[in-house]
Image: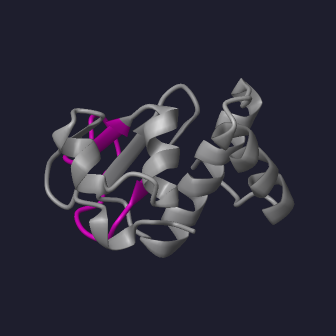
Amino acid sequence: MPARLKPAAPADVAAALARVADATAERADLKLLVKHFLAVLETRAPGRSVEVRVPPYAAVQVIEGVRHTRGTPPAVVETDAATWIAVATGELAWLDAVEAGRVQASGERTDLTSYLPLR
């Protein structure tokens, strides 16, 4: 079983978010924030029925329900790093991101509205 993601140190998160806000973020900042917010989601929505993917950085399985063990999961959420950070911080509403096509969500339990924002 792969190691669970761990939330980043608050000072590191704040610094990376500041660089994202002023458009000076680097790949390392995006990676730190994506993994941090996925770790927070994993803590708040334990389970294995929905796979949340933010390529190329990380993926987690969350939300109670049918357990997924191999192959393509029955419920998948996929988005890019910038969109994930925006919805995780509350800068962008989940439904707005889905309607704009910035998030692809298929299957049951893929509406993450009740878990967001993650700050």
Q: Is residue 82 above or below residue 68?
A: above
Q: Report the residue at 23% width, 63% height from top.
A: 66
Q: Report the residue at 69% width, 37% height from top.
A: 22
Q: Nearer the viewer, residue 69 or 79?
A: 79
Q: Quadrant of residue 28?
A: top right
Q: Report the residue at 74% width, 39% height from top.
A: 19
Residue 70 at what x, y percent from top left?
33, 40
Which residues, given as a range, are shown in magenta? 60-78
Is there any visible trace of residue 95 in the rendered image?
A: yes
Q: Is residue 64 above or below residue 74?
A: below
73 within the magenta span: yes
Residue 71 at what x, y percent from top left?
30, 34
The colour style of the image is one colour
Q: Report the residue at 22% width, 59% height from top.
A: 111
On-image quarter of the C terminus: bottom right
Residue 113 at what x, y percent from top left?
29, 65
Q: Residue furthest front?
A: 22
